[in-house]
Image: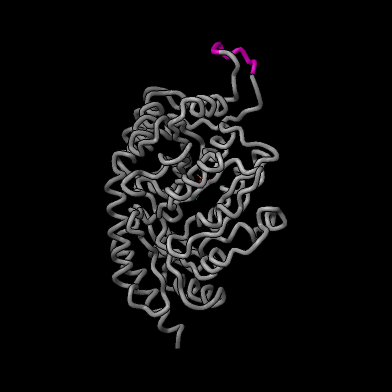
Amino acid sequence: MRTVSGMTSVPMSAPAVGPAELALVSKAIETGWISSRGQFLTDFEEAFARYVRGGQGIATTSGTTALHLALAALRIGPGDEVVVPDFTMIACANAVLYCGATPIFGDVDPTTWTLDPADLERKITRRTRAVMPVHIYGHPADMDPIRRIARTHGLSVVEDAAEAHGALYRGRSVGGLGTAGCFSFYSNKIITTGEGGMVVTQSKAVAGRARRLRDLAFAHATRDYRHSELAFNYRMTNVQAAIGLAQLRRIDEFIEHRRACARIYADLLGDIDGVTLPAEAPWARNVYWMYTVLIPGGVTSRARIIRRLASEGIESRVAFWPLHRQAFLRKGKGAKGRFPIADDLSRRGLSLPSGNGITETMVAEAAQTLKRVLREDAR
Ligand SMILES: *Cc1c(COP(=O)(O)O)cnc(C)c1O
């Protein structure tokens, strides 16, 4: 893989797709079912929803559209507020805004980096309709207190599990713990369909409405071009689902691989002063979507470390930029207040090569190079 500085020997991420995926894609093409109907689609929706014990699955074009579809199916709209963690990917805030609702940011827990239930509680107003816990970098959010608070205040819980397929909270799969759960199948996620996503939900009403809204809300089964409301085309194709189905058969192997890579990182980076490794709470199984560490120093020294790594062929990436500091969000109501933990993570976080196609050898090389670069930088 090429970067500006030349050859990269260890990229940030690489998917593992091969003969198994190709075989099912060929089948989809041979049968002519390449659009948004077909056996692979229904099989993938059913098998994935079963894997996460999520009820029904509604496949979409992306994780972002899965989040939007879930909120729309819950009738989140103008005047409503949805609490999302400040430290996450931009899609969480965008999905709320697509509904015309207001995202309200909550700070995160310093250990798990997921939504802090205490800050969630402080951010609830009479307009709050839902909370969107994010299982960040593959580590589950602390769902019991979040669900307790949601129940007390009558909120829906829309889990963003885009980074955490197969992660466990007290032995139960994330994504199946809320009113709805949303996944992404982008190429660097735990399993991929190239681009794609899925909403899972135990609620028949939410599932039915999500299916209708995914498909332009045709009013009649005859599809006579009358539509009951404003809706979307968020349909996944049968070709994408074929890739997803082949990937799903390998998911346990992928997760084991990611956990083995995390152990290598921990072994090699665990004894460096000032470096914080990602946590795994006693109640959690982390699937280590992107192995992210906190390094000492500020953003300038981190930029220097990233450049030094790149010059040695190791790709790395900064952690998420907090939502309350995003140019188009920082003047909004949700950005009010202080977010010291999200700010700290975003300044010190460094994501290291991780993924189904990143080998243990690559991980060891990345870790050893980082160790040396940090030592040299400290001099
Ligand atoms: C990847 C991701 C998304 C969006 O998924 P896409 O498929 O890229 O649209 C949403 N939330 C989180 C936390 C993500 O990491």
In the rendered image, residue 346, in percent from the top left (x then y), is placed at 54, 65
Say if 70 sits above or below 267 in the image.
above
Query: Given the current orientation, which residue lies at the most extreme right position?
Result: 331
Residue 212 lies left or right of residue 252; in this view the side is: right
* Residue 97 in view of the camera: no
Of residues 189 and 358, the one drawn nearer to the viewer in this rendering:
189
Say if 310 sits above or below 62 in the image.
below
Of residues 96 and 14, the one drawn nearer to the viewer in this rendering:
96
Say if 238 sits above or below 266 in the image.
above
Whether 376 is among the magenta residues is no
Indicate the colouring scheme.
one colour
Task: Tell me the chief SS of the magenta region.
Answer: loop
Residue 203 lies left or right of residue 261; in this view the side is: right
Say if 217 sits above or below 60 in the image.
above
Residue at x 43% of width, y 29% of height: 238
Of residues 371 and 243, the one drawn nearer to the viewer in this rendering:
371
Q: Quadrant of the C terminus?
A: bottom left
Q: Which residues are magenta?
A: 221-227
Residue at x 55% of width, y 24% of height: 212
Query: Given the current orientation, which residue lies at the most extreme bottom position?
Result: 379
Of residues 208 and 364, the one drawn nearer to the viewer in this rendering:
208
Residue 373 lies left or right of residue 337; in this view the side is: left
In the rendered image, residue 50, in percent from the top left (x then y), is placed at 34, 33
* Residue 107 in view of the camera: yes
**How many marks can you see?**
0
Residue at x 33% of width, y 53% of height: 285
Q: Quadrant of the N terminus?
A: bottom left
In the rendered image, residue 80, in percent from the top left (x then y), is placed at 66, 41
In the rendered image, residue 284, in percent from the top left (x then y), is placed at 34, 54
Whether 225 is among the magenta residues is yes
